[in-house]
Image (cartoon, rainbow, N blue to C red):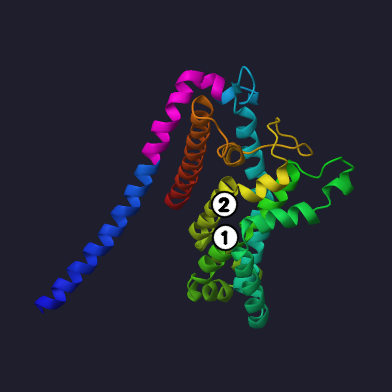
Amino acid sequence: MKAKRFMENAIHGFFLLMGLVTVGCVLLISVYLVVSGIPAIREIGLVKFLFGPVWNSNAAEPQFGILPFILTSIYGTAGAILLGVPVGYMTAVFLAKMAPPKLKTAVSAAVSLLAGIPSVVYGLVGMLVLVIRQVFHIPDGSGLLAAIIVLAIMILPSIINVAMTALEAVPREYEDASLALGATATETWFKVSVPAARSGIAAAVVLGVGRAIGEAMAVMMVSGNVPNMPSLFQSVRFLTTAVASEMGYAAAGLQRQALFSIALVLFLFIMLINAALNFFLKRSKEK
């Protein structure tokens, strides 16, 4: 009996230690970004850094305005969510409630395979396959629109898998009661099952947003990676690609510190979005 209790306490202690390690890693990253990013913001000026329209870190008189990066990240993420969430949501409902077993197995395997493709492959395929240049008669296919399309495809697996799991977890009794009251199968799926799985579907959207904001390699390959103000058919640069493209050759000093400041802004941006989504999710649960 004592040995069993000791083993149980040891297992509880191990899981507690792992949880503390995870929290410690998050705190360590947060502190490191703050310590590394604040000096550049203090030297450049918060308003000038966040709302400056020009980024030219290698000029004789360097300028470190990241407003184009912020707006591009916002527009790119919003566009990817607008394209990807409806497709992922409807696909999850179809697979969880409508699809025949064989078709569900095949499509689920394809979605899982899509999740395992490296981001650099998405970027390469985007560079070679997207026909934006030919369709819209622009000289270069790289731009915000290409990045939005690639990001929308990349977030599909996260949204589909999590939303489908949430829909499948809805108790069968809910649907049986709805059907017994005379509702059709479609009405039951969208008016009973989907509201019951709302928290899981919201979690899927949060994961999709995180994937879209944090992606760098694929976006760098299809967006053009030029610090312009955002435009659908013009080369642009995201917050993530700004750090990834310059960190390798950035000289020690203000330029490197400014890149850490961009990483800090990106970190706070993601935390703000997650906090806002969780806040609205909790409010909807209380109602």
**Residue 167, x across and y down, in percent:** 54, 67
Q: 2 or 167, which lies in front?
A: 2
Can you see residue 44? yes
Q: Is residue 155 left or right of residue 162?
A: right
- Residue 114 on the magenta span: no
Residue 244 horizontal/vertical position (percent) = 58, 42
The secondary element bearing badge 1 is classed as helix
Q: Is residue 181 above or below residue 141?
A: below
Q: Earlier in the sequence, mark 2 or mark 1?
A: 1
The relative height of residue 51 versus residue 110 in the rendered view (above or below) is: above
Q: Residue at x 42, y 36 (%)?
A: 33
Instruction: Determine the image quadrant of residue 145.
Output: top right
Judging by the rendered image, the residue that carries numbered circle 1 is 158
Magenta span dominant secondary structure: helix
Residue at x-position 81% and y-position 45%: 141
Magenta-colored span: 30-49
Q: Which residue is mark 2?
A: 211
Asked if the residues shown at circle 2 and circle 1 are in contact, with their CB atoms under 8 angstroms apart, the answer is yes
- Residue 53 coordinates in the image, percent (x, y): 65, 23
Mark 2 is on which residue type? Arg
- Mark 2 lies on a secondary structure that is helix
Residue 45 in view, yes or no: no
Say which quadrant the N terminus sits in. bottom left
Distance between the alpha carbons at the discs numbered 2 and 1: 8 Å
Task: Decide which of 87, 119 is in the foreground and name it.
Answer: 119
Where is residue 66? Give x, y as percent.
Answer: 59, 28
User: Which residue is painted at 53% across and 51% down in the image?
Assistant: 206
